Amino acid sequence: MSHVIENIAPSEEFAAFFEDNGETAYLYLARIANGEILGITDSLWMYNQIEPPISAYEQVLLAWTEDSSRVAFIINGHCLGMMDLAAGRKATANLHGEIPFTYWESGMPQEFGMPLSLEVPKE
């Protein structure tokens, strides 16, 4: 059974989706216009199976900054993934180590994480 969370940015230009299907978990970023999802712009692998399963955690959420520049995936107060739209970077704790709260407040440095795409790929 999949565990899915979604959260639309305050600007209503992007939405973040988290999905854990019991085997792998990903964070997705989608572009929105007029309330319609235009497509996924990027994804971020979060983890493979975790113990306990995601449904056992007390707090699982996606949080946006007020200015819609960053979205974080948080489990029980720990940031496991972040997409920084302003810096064009994304990071997961499993690949890049702990994501400091200062990155939430002031942005992700260019040397941290990986590039983030903000455009829907053309078909």
Image (cartoon, rainbow, N blue to C red):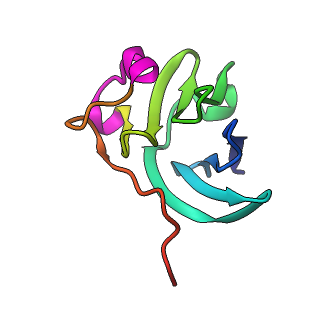
Residue with the most extreme left position = 111
The chief SS type of the magenta part is helix
Tell me if 7 is positioned left or right of 40 in this view: right
Residue shown at 42% from the left, 57% from the top? 117
**How many numbered marks are there?**
0
Q: Is residue 76 above or below residue 8?
A: above
Tell me if 22 is positioned left or right of 94 in this view: right
**The stretch drawn in magenta includes residue 109:** no
Q: Is residue 104 above or below residue 108?
A: above
Please state the extent of the stretch shown in magenta in the rendering. 94-106
Residue with the most extreme right position = 35
Residue shown at 51% from the left, 35% from the top? 69
**The stretch drawn in magenta includes residue 102:** yes
Tell me if 36 is positioned left or right of 62 in this view: right
Q: Position of residue 110 (x, y in %)?
A: 24, 37
Tell me if 78 is positioned left or right of 89 in this view: right
Residue shown at 38% from the left, 23% from the top? 103
Q: Position of residue 11 (x, y in %)?
A: 68, 40
Q: Is residue 106 above or below residue 88?
A: above
Q: Position of residue 8 (x, y in %)?
A: 71, 42
Residue with the most extreme bottom position = 123
Residue shown at 59% from the left, 35% from the top? 68
Foreground residue, 62 or 45?
A: 62
Q: Residue 55 falls in which quadrant of the image?
A: top right
Foreground residue, 24 or 31?
A: 31
Q: Position of residue 113 (x, y in %)?
A: 29, 40
